[in-house]
Amino acid sequence: MDHTDQVAQAGLVQAVVADDHEIVLHGLRDLLGCAGISVAAEVQDGLAAIAAIKREQPDLALIDLQLPLANGAEVHAEARRWSPQTRFVMLTGSASPQMLAELLGTGLHGLFLKSGPPSELVEALPRILAGVPVVGRAVAQIVADAESAGLTRRELQVLQEISSGATGLQISQHLGISAKTVENHRASLMRKLQVHSTASLIMSAVRRGLLSPDG
């Protein structure tokens, strides 16, 4: 038994949990309890999460990506300045490959989809607490599928904009590129995904895991 296991079993490992849904907080509390980790604070928005992490200096912080007032990425960026020893794990209901790839580059200790099996997170906790970054299988698959499709980061951005219903002009304004460049990216996306309409482009992207079903 290593030091991390001994500390966890002694109930000395503490966590801060942040999610804006009470039922999710309850489930995470039970999940951490099964791993021998006590919850020092439960909060439901990003600003409260930052304050709790600064105050509690926890060993672990489980943070939902979509938090009100400050999102999970903002919480991580700010709170780690005040509690550098904390291991940060991000949970998300859905995210684009681009967003997941960007999150993986921020120094998180763990990144998991909420749709994944609870056992995956529980089994990963000892490694995370030991400082080993762990990526959920579904997250790794989404990022790998995007890479295998040969899509560039900019193409993924355009794809996300298209799925949200943005026009070519709106996409060019949002991304700071010309309307012609937007159309070139749209044509490239259709060629790479072997489709011939916007509707089939979005459907193909969802099937490949490049977009969440709700866009």
Image (spheres, helix red, strand yellow):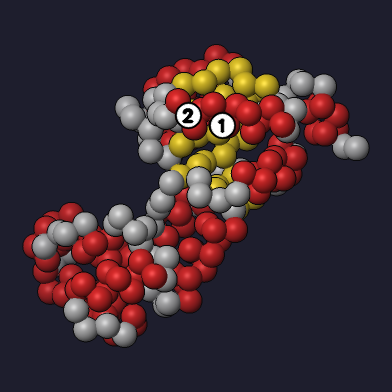
Q: Is residue 196 above or below residue 112?
A: below
Q: In this orientation, does residue 212 appear? A: yes
Quadrant including the N terminus:
top right
Find the distance from the CA under tag 1 to the CA under tag 2: 6 Å
Q: Is residue 139 above or below residue 132?
A: below
- At which x and y percent is residue 160? 28, 60
Q: Is residue 9 above or below residue 168?
A: above
At a point 59% along the width and 53% down the height, the residue shown is: 136
- At which x and y percent is residue 153? 36, 65
Q: Is residue 171 left or right of residue 204?
A: left
Q: In this orientation, does residue 84 appear? A: no
At a point 38% along the width and 33% down the height, the residue shown is: 67
> Which residue position is annotated with label 2?
23
At a point 55% along the width and 47% down the height, the residue shown is: 111
Which amino acid, by three-letter code, is at mark 1? Gly
Labels 1 and 2 touching (C-beta < 8 A)? yes
- Local secondary structure at mark 2: helix
Q: Residues within 10 Å of mark 1 (few under 14, many from 20)?
A: few
- At which x and y percent is residue 150? 42, 77
Which amino acid, by three-letter code, is at mark 2? Ile
Quarter where residue 21 is shown = top left
> Which residue position is annotated with label 1?
27
Q: Is residue 181 above or below residue 14?
A: below
- Local secondary structure at mark 1: helix
